[in-house]
Amino acid sequence: MILRPRPGAFALLFALRGSIVPRIAGRLCVVAALSTLLTVADLSHPHLFVQVPAAPFTFMGLALSIFLGFRTSTCYARWWEARRLWGRLIAAARDLARDAGALFPNEAALRRRLLYRVAGFAQGLAAQLRGEDVAAALRPWLPVPEAAALGTLRNPLQAALRACAADLAACRAEGRIGEVLYVRLDGHLSALTEAQTGCEGIRNTPTPFAYWLLLNRTAWLFCLLLPFGFVGSLGLATPVVVIILAYTFFGLDELADELEDPFGRAANDLPLDALARMVEIELREALGEAELPEPMRPDARFVLL
Amino acid sequence: MILRPRPGAFALLFALRGSIVPRIAGRLCVVAALSTLLTVADLSHPHLFVQVPAAPFTFMGLALSIFLGFRTSTCYARWWEARRLWGRLIAAARDLARDAGALFPNEAALRRRLLYRVAGFAQGLAAQLRGEDVAAALRPWLPVPEAAALGTLRNPLQAALRACAADLAACRAEGRIGEVLYVRLDGHLSALTEAQTGCEGIRNTPTPFAYWLLLNRTAWLFCLLLPFGFVGSLGLATPVVVIILAYTFFGLDELADELEDPFGRAANDLPLDALARMVEIELREALGEAELPEPMRPDARFVLL
Amino acid sequence: MILRPRPGAFALLFALRGSIVPRIAGRLCVVAALSTLLTVADLSHPHLFVQVPAAPFTFMGLALSIFLGFRTSTCYARWWEARRLWGRLIAAARDLARDAGALFPNEAALRRRLLYRVAGFAQGLAAQLRGEDVAAALRPWLPVPEAAALGTLRNPLQAALRACAADLAACRAEGRIGEVLYVRLDGHLSALTEAQTGCEGIRNTPTPFAYWLLLNRTAWLFCLLLPFGFVGSLGLATPVVVIILAYTFFGLDELADELEDPFGRAANDLPLDALARMVEIELREALGEAELPEPMRPDARFVLL
Amino acid sequence: MILRPRPGAFALLFALRGSIVPRIAGRLCVVAALSTLLTVADLSHPHLFVQVPAAPFTFMGLALSIFLGFRTSTCYARWWEARRLWGRLIAAARDLARDAGALFPNEAALRRRLLYRVAGFAQGLAAQLRGEDVAAALRPWLPVPEAAALGTLRNPLQAALRACAADLAACRAEGRIGEVLYVRLDGHLSALTEAQTGCEGIRNTPTPFAYWLLLNRTAWLFCLLLPFGFVGSLGLATPVVVIILAYTFFGLDELADELEDPFGRAANDLPLDALARMVEIELREALGEAELPEPMRPDARFVLL
Amino acid sequence: MILRPRPGAFALLFALRGSIVPRIAGRLCVVAALSTLLTVADLSHPHLFVQVPAAPFTFMGLALSIFLGFRTSTCYARWWEARRLWGRLIAAARDLARDAGALFPNEAALRRRLLYRVAGFAQGLAAQLRGEDVAAALRPWLPVPEAAALGTLRNPLQAALRACAADLAACRAEGRIGEVLYVRLDGHLSALTEAQTGCEGIRNTPTPFAYWLLLNRTAWLFCLLLPFGFVGSLGLATPVVVIILAYTFFGLDELADELEDPFGRAANDLPLDALARMVEIELREALGEAELPEPMRPDARFVLL
């Protein structure tokens, strides 16, 4: 199943999906006001800024571009690694569904218990990464006694995987599978653990704060100094040029911030709900269930959560 | 077997394979018209643009180059990762063919069933990634009852792999292979699942829309401002320089868009049909079939789909 | 469980968490003094610096930006690899907890011995990477005879893992697990070893000293030459521009130094204590202990150690 | 055994090994002729080019540098990945030699059959990647009936690996090895398959043609425009500066082309013949053969094929 | 155990550890002489260089910075990959020590034979990568008959691993371990092989010579042209600026050369002897030996070999 969150570019220009402008509007206004002010001052006092050449500002801007470029690339890498980890989760769920179906063809209850816990794991991980109630997301997918015990746990997702492993170990104890198959099936649980641990690492460990602070302050200082440097040479065009540059620089900075924690509910974050729903659909289809929920679709503004 | 889609460079210059020009021709015309207009205005009103120095525009262009460079490199990485995942699919198909031939030397029907499903998996994955009918591509390769059940499935490719696993589990139940060999053969199916999941991740998760929008708008604004900055100093050469720059910038932008989703049918996309055909040929050769289809060859314009 | 070390940006601006300014204040003062001096000299002797154009300094600064950019990106990669290795440690601890619980459900003493050693391994690794007393951190988690033998060991962490392996081998000798499960459980110990070895590699192998020296010296030379190049054209604005640039360049350099060894106790280092505590909490929860310690929280300056 | 293809730098300067100059000499002549022509014209008509400032050309050149930098880095990555894949092949051959020697100490014929096929695999892969006759390279290493059947095969290398797997499966059927050892030994064959598949992927999938075309055309346009931009300011030095720049840009472009397909016989391509010979020597040494061929050495121009 | 080769920065400035200056002193002198000469000529003939603007030189320098940046980053990546491979060797040695101790608790002779061979492997690999006598480094660690047979071997390190595997296969033949444990222990030998093969790949395959030649020549040409471009505008400051730039460019180039082959004995190379000693200490500690050698410490100039 394929989700296609990107429609035609034209429609999107109007739908404003994910545009960064609203969130940097305040900053742009400050810069626009300052540069307009300076342009007016330059017009009324023609020789006020003549002595300021553009070269030093050009150099500052290029240095900032290089550093912003690295920040953009770093934060994008985090975003993509998060997506890759969810791909690992999806692949592990598919592997487990395939193996459970092949190895326990006549034990529907066991298969359902295993796969429902994994569907709940995906829902719960999405909730955890978004700072929502993990237990509430996980509970509907667990057998009653396990669901009841969730409330007091620090890490309910791992508890769900431990319950899966206990089921598998019971099969081994009864001789239905040997050690090799236990290890194989348990390996899929390890893949789920790896996805959870990796996502938590991205969520818990933002890029170093001093790095963000340094770039953010430099971007501010640069955008505020820029009109001083350009007004002498660009005259009336100063506000236009300054606003375009501020738009690019503040926009990249803001976007890097958004991608740095890719698990939120902003337009450019990962569609965790849609991915968790996809896992649910595939696992229930593998169980042979007939009534499957619909996959999530982008909304009218083409945003998929 | 080696496919060689790149002929001599000279032939290609005429064949225009994959040239990006036709798709950015509209944009180039807009920019050319504007810069010609400004040049004419500058010639007729000599002092109109004299006061605009090139330095700020130079700086804008360099900042844009840095950001475009990162976008190009990001989208190329997606394209190459997609190719790598197809390589993983091919290697898994070869491994399965080798193991099936060695372990089930006297069970031609089982081997044929397993390998045909994998050949169908490759065809179906190509269809899915190109938004075509997966079930239609997969059906001819499946036994009749499985083919009949395809229509109602959300994820037919995984169903084909589940059928393979069921065959292997049956072998284990009959004692023909032990747990270790089941896990080994099932591991090849996991590799196929990994390839599918990875490709879907690339297909479903475009780079953040705001990133694209920011760069695209900045490229437009820059290319439209460029002639204002250069006409005062370059005079008649302005349209030439501006068009060359617009060609490079819009060209890189358009190419990054094309590489971002590497599964289409454009000239620079991955040749999925040729790769799926290659898998088919190798699997049928491993089955000992005598009449094999020909590998796909680039067409007269050197395009391989 | 999720640790969130980054509070709102506004609060942090005041809390000064991780700001790099205090540590580069001395360097900034030197540069500020020099550029003020030159500005004063330029004002009193107007034609002293006129003949020095900014272009060569611009070029030097850009070259330095490019090299600093690579250093930043290299050191950030080390920091992130260190975090990834701790993620591997956490995942291995979770896997071991799950498998021990499922495979030895009735052997609480064995399970407790295994998991306590792993909790101690995490504490000890944090201590080792910070140059503190490994044996002291590890000892409380070991059975008495093992704790007593620690003092004379060169690598106490590996000794703890060897004790785990001996326990597992004893289980195998008694027939409670077969070779396959021994290998599976021992594999988790290999993952812990891999995390330790990788972290030691980062700690023991700083980036080449000549590389650091070259960049550091170039940054100094550049920041000291900068006012000479700018004072002729920027006049009174020289100290402002020079200090902003020195702030960015010295700041990035200092931050790269801090990230290069990510295991210290500076504000931007990895929160090893908090991670080791998290491992402890999860392992004790998996053992069914009721009274768990609290996770560590960032302090009033939002610093998490 | 270590091959050292790089002699002292001084000797190489004379030996001209791998110098890119001969292959871009034509392009350099065109650029040199044009810039000389323009310089002469500028000298005879002093005010012809005065009005063309260098700034726009500087900017074009920097943008091109950034894009060329990414292409260089991309093509180098392909070259290095190809080397890494051959390293994987070598490691797999060593693993197989070690395991075959340890597990089949008294079955010299079987060991020889297995390892000779792998030596032939390395020779055949080198031939395939260079567009030479695979079957001819592989045939001498196979038992007679297999060698005779090669001619009609599409993928002879995989057929050799399938023959290895059939030998191993026969050992398992006879009870000499169990499933676990079959899987272990077959895993080495999978590593060989992975190396072959990866190398084929690099060979068959050049970087997108439009990307090459765009950079190549931009480099040409830039180098042809460059003298127009510089002649007004550099005067007689124009041809020198332009030729140096054209040398760097065309040189990097040509080198990237050479590294893109790292399997040719150019001076900077990978020394596949030497690597395949090394595999042969090591495998025959592991078989206990006394007369081993010599490793290949760089020729008088320090080129190793 | 942690080795700390980096002392306080202040001490190092005096100790000159790893400073690149001595090795580029000759080149710096050439450039210094030329720029001094030109400055003197400019002073005595004031209008000699006036007509040469700095812009083209600025552009050349930036292009060179970009290309040098990529070369630096490429060579650093090789250096770090080499360190990572040695980390893999260390982890494999620790895994083998742990498993051997747990699985063969009562067979001290076998354990000692296995681990001593691995200690010798580390010493021998260090020797091989530094072009020293492998057999001499390996011999003391082998049983007498194996040591005697070393002289005639092409790849003595692999022979040592084959002897380990033969020991393990003998254990399996005697029934002390099953196939699973053989594969597990043999897997550690595969990791050692992987480390050896990877290091040999780095050692044997320098970056393409044409790439080095192109950058080296461009750096020379640029540094020699630089004073011509700057003397007209910088006057007396020319030699200072040119020498700083030449120091940075030649320094980065030389450092990249040093990191490209990270196995030498230069100050910035990897401390292979210290790493091999560390492996020796850990393996002997795991064997229970009481008298362990001391770890290697940096010398008075803070250099660790």
Image (cartoon, coloured by chain):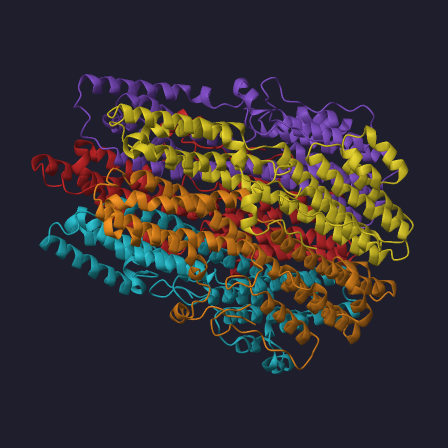
Chain colours: A yellow, B orange, C purple, D cyan, E red
Is residue E17 depicted above or below E66 in this figure? above
Image point 39% across, 39% down: which residue?
C67
Q: Which image quarter holds the N terminus of chain B?
A: bottom right
Residue C98 falls in image quadrant:
top right
Seen in the image, is D124 located left or right of residue D184? Answer: left
Q: Is residue E9 left or right of residue C88?
A: left
Q: Quadrant of residue B179?
A: bottom right
Q: Quadrant of the C terminus of chain B?
A: bottom right
Residue E72 picture location, percent across and down: 41, 44
Locate residue D58, reporting x and y percent.
29, 46
The image position of residue C257, as x and y in percent, is 47, 30
For the image, the number of numbered tags is 0
User: Can residue E247 be seen in the rendering of this structure?
Assistant: no
Q: Farthest left residue?
A: E45
Q: Nearer the viewer, residue A12 or D202?
A: A12
Q: Is residue B251 shown left or right of residue C96?
A: left
Out of E232 and E152, give the one closest to the viewer: E232
The residue nearer to you, when weighing B281 against E265, is B281
**Res D285 seen here:** yes
E27 relative to D6, above or below? above
Image location (x, y in percent) of residue E48: 10, 41
